[in-house]
Image (cartoon, rainbow, N blue to C red):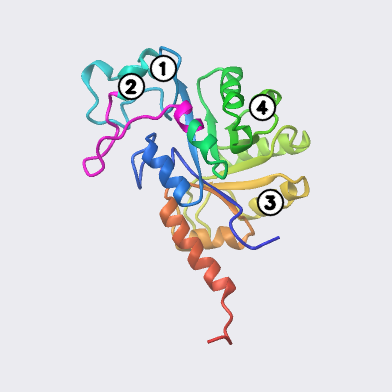
């Protein structure tokens, strides 16, 4: 196997809300331009439009939200109201929440592009119907924390990839991993481990590196891709994960991630005796 990043995901619509505003089309284009799979968290408006939005409300991502929309669930807001809201920043204004139909239309025109859909609050069958209508199932990874929902989705869109993300305490993650491993990773093509902070001298994360290595070996034996999501990382943290053999990531800081990976692989691939 080639020693390189296999697949990486730009969390929360391409930039995690850190390098660019989240949930807007510019963030998705950012993730695609950097070579990643941007993630859409899918919710639905009151008039049935599926949109990319992580939270049930707009309050967190829109500090200047009009009073009449504060605290209101997206499911109680029309598409016309939603797309009138600017979710941009002072130095990156005029950005708006994007619909899944807009994103699928882009995928249809760019078959080389892929994206992740993190399941939130919509009908699985309706979501799969739209994916199949646009003919983009092979460009989609459907993600959630419930393996039974992944299997249900796979029935509607068998060409799509599925990802079971595992979060919480190290004990909970290990328990969840043991369960899906004993089930033979049925209906699952990717497993994502959340790496929560618990700073140590050599390893930053609560989930111990020995378990990550073990999970990597067990998923590889079943032709399942193991991915990690380090919520925070510095150069040495990412180097330590890469040294375990992990080659798939989800990140909130895609530009920073790409730079550190370039540094890591440049050192591994350097030939000392070549000028």
Kind of element beneath mark 2: helix
Q: Residues within 10 Å of mark 2 (few under 14, many from 20)?
A: some
Which quadrant of the figure has residue 149?
Answer: top right
Residue 1 place in picture, x, y as percent: 71, 60
Closer-to-camera residue (119/97) = 97
* Relative to 226, 51 lies left or right: left
Residue 45: numbered disc: 1
Name which of mark 4 and mark 1 comes first in the sequence. Answer: 1
Residue 216: numbered disc: 3
Residue 82: numbered disc: 2
Name which of mark 3 and mark 1 comes first in the sequence. Answer: 1
Real-space Cα distance between discs 2 and 3? 41 Å
Real-space Cα distance between discs 2 and 4? 29 Å
**Residue lying at 59% horizontally and 80% vertically, measured from the top left:** 271
Real-space Cα distance between discs 3 and 1? 39 Å
- Please name the predominant secondary structure of the magenta segment in the image: loop
* Relative to 77, 204 lies left or right: right
Residue 112 place in picture, x, y as percent: 57, 45
Residue 98 on the magenta span:
yes
Residue 140 place in picture, x, y as percent: 59, 35
Q: Nearer the viewer, mark 4 or mark 1?
A: 4
The answer to whether marks 3 and 4 mark residues whose Cβ atoms lie closer than 8 Å is no
User: Which residue matches tag 4?
Assistant: 157
Q: Nearer the viewer, mark 3 or mark 1?
A: 1
């Amino acid at each position: 196997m080639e020693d390189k990043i296999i697949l990486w995901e730009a969390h929360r619509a391409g930039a995690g809300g850190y390098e660019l505003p989240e949930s807007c089309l510019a963030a998705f284009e950012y993730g695609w331009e950097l070579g990643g799979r941007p993630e859409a968290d899918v919710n639905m408006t009151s008039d049935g439009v599926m949109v990319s939005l992580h939270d049930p409300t707009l309050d967190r991502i829109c500090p200047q939200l009009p009073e009449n929309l504060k605290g209101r669930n997206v499911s109680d807001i029309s598409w016309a109201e939603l797309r009138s809201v600017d979710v941009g920043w002072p130095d990156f204004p005029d950005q708006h929440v994007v619909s899944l139909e807009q994103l699928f239309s882009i995928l249809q025109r760019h078959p080389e592009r892929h994206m992740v859909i993190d399941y939130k609050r919509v009908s699985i069958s309706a979501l799969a119907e739209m994916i199949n209508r646009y003919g983009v199932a092979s460009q989609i990874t459907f993600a959630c924390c419930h393996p039974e929902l992944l299997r249900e989705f796979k029935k509607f869109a068998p060409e799509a990839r599925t990802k079971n993300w595992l979060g919480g305490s190290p004990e909970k993650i290990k328990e969840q991993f043991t369960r899906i491993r004993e089930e033979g990773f049925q209906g699952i093509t990717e497993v994502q481990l959340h790496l929560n902070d618990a700073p140590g001298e050599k390893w930053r994360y609560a989930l111990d590196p020995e378990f990550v290595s073990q999970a990597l070996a067990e998923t590889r034996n079943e032709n399942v891709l193991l991915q990690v999501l380090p919520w925070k990382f510095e150069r040495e943290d990412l180097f330590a994960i890469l040294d375990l053999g992990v080659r798939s990531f989800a990140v909130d800081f895609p530009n920073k991630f790409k730079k550190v990976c370039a540094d890591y692989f440049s050192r591994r691939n350097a030939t000392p005796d070549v000028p």
